[in-house]
Amino acid sequence: MQAKLKFERNKIGSRGSSSLIIVCVTMIIILSSAVATDIIYGAISRYCLKMNAEYVATEGAKALVKSRSEAVEYMRKLSVSKVNDLNSLEINVSENDRQINVIMGKPFKYIFLRLIGISATQLRTNIVLKISGISEYKGVRPLAIERNKITFGDKKILTDASEKFQNYIKTQFILSKSDSSDADILYGIREKLKVGDRVDFIKSYDSNKIKKSIDELTAKCKHKPVCSYLQYNENCSKIIIVPVVNRSNEDNEWKIIGFAGFFIENCETVDGKIYITGRFLKFTVNGTIDDSALDFGLSGTSLIP
Ligand SMILES: [Zn+2]
């Protein structure tokens, strides 16, 4: 009888300790999950802050190529609108406008860790964006412009005519692998072209056909209000990227020395010659950048890790 009682007591005791273990394990699981949730949530918030800083720097670079004074103010406003609870912000632009540094900070409030007394921490991110000339680009139009002093805002005429007149820029049409200048004008040359590449020019072509393609390209702009040099949609079909070429002294061949962005305003043909009126723009694109690339107004960006 006594032995049976002892057995029952042992049974109750072991049940009690099992329950305690289950409670402890459950508590540990709940606590670990809570800590893990806070850590993951913190990591996501830190990532979002970094993405926002990258966005601000990239948009800032677009503004910087046009105006330095407006770019910094624009980045400040953009940072405040993009990041909730932003409590520290530092924006630095290098003297030569080739580097942007954005440092942002915001508080992060823990959801569960505050129950054990850890209420908040400070998130911080530091982004450095480099701006350089474009050395390689895919999708250039087959209009190679001869090296010239490029100015921005002034009316220029790209032409294959041989006579010289005010604001003219000698232009030749590139022979690409696609063998279709119409497609190259409408969609850009499919191959990536880079600084140093030799270019061959089309010897004979129908200027009316080229004008038709250019008119077709510019007619694709359906933006409201209609894009102009001063106000345009950055993806407008009237904006083309063209290679700048120069005849090499070493081998007498035409080679690409850089890339420029041109806003087309009009296209005409007179006596079989083409006259494309427009203005050069300064803007950034997605392309390979190189510090040694010549500056014709077109630049690209990359983050410095
Ligand atoms: Zn447009």
Image: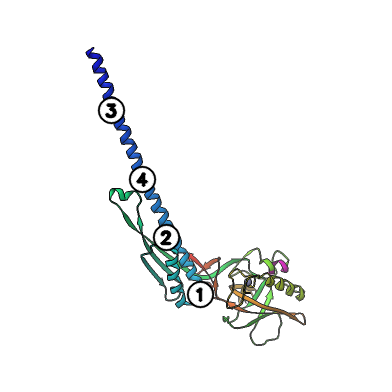
**From the image, which quarter does the C terminus lie in?**
bottom left
Residue 116 locus on image (x, y percent)? 28, 48
Q: Secondary structure at mark 1?
A: loop
Residue to which mark 3 is pinned: 16
Q: Which residues are magenta?
A: 181-185
**Which amino acid type is marked by label 1?**
Val
Using the numbered discs, state the Cα–Cα distance from disc 4 to disc 3 in whole angstroms: 27 Å
From the viewer's perspective, is 233 left or right of 46?
Answer: right
Q: Secondary structure at mark 2?
A: helix
**Which amino acid type is marked by label 4?**
Ala
Residue extending farthest left: 2
Residue 126 placement: quadrant: bottom left
Nearer to the camera, 258 or 209 = 209
Residue 34 placement: quadrant: top left
Marks 4 and 1, the one that precedes in the sequence: 4
**From the image, which quarter does the N terminus lie in?**
top left
Residue to which mark 2 is pinned: 49
Residue to which mark 4 is pinned: 34
**Which amino acid type is marked by label 3?**
Gly
Residue to which mark 1 is pinned: 65
- Secondary structure mainly formed by the magenta segment: helix
From the viewer's perspective, is 35 left or right of 221?
Answer: left
Q: Secondary structure at mark 3?
A: helix
**Which amino acid type is marked by label 2?**
Leu
Q: Secondary structure at mark 4?
A: helix
Cβ–Cβ under 8 Å for marks 4 and 1: no
From the viewer's perspective, is 53 left or right of 25?
Answer: right
Q: Nearer the viewer, mark 2 or mark 3?
A: 3
Q: Nearer the viewer, mark 4 or mark 3?
A: 3
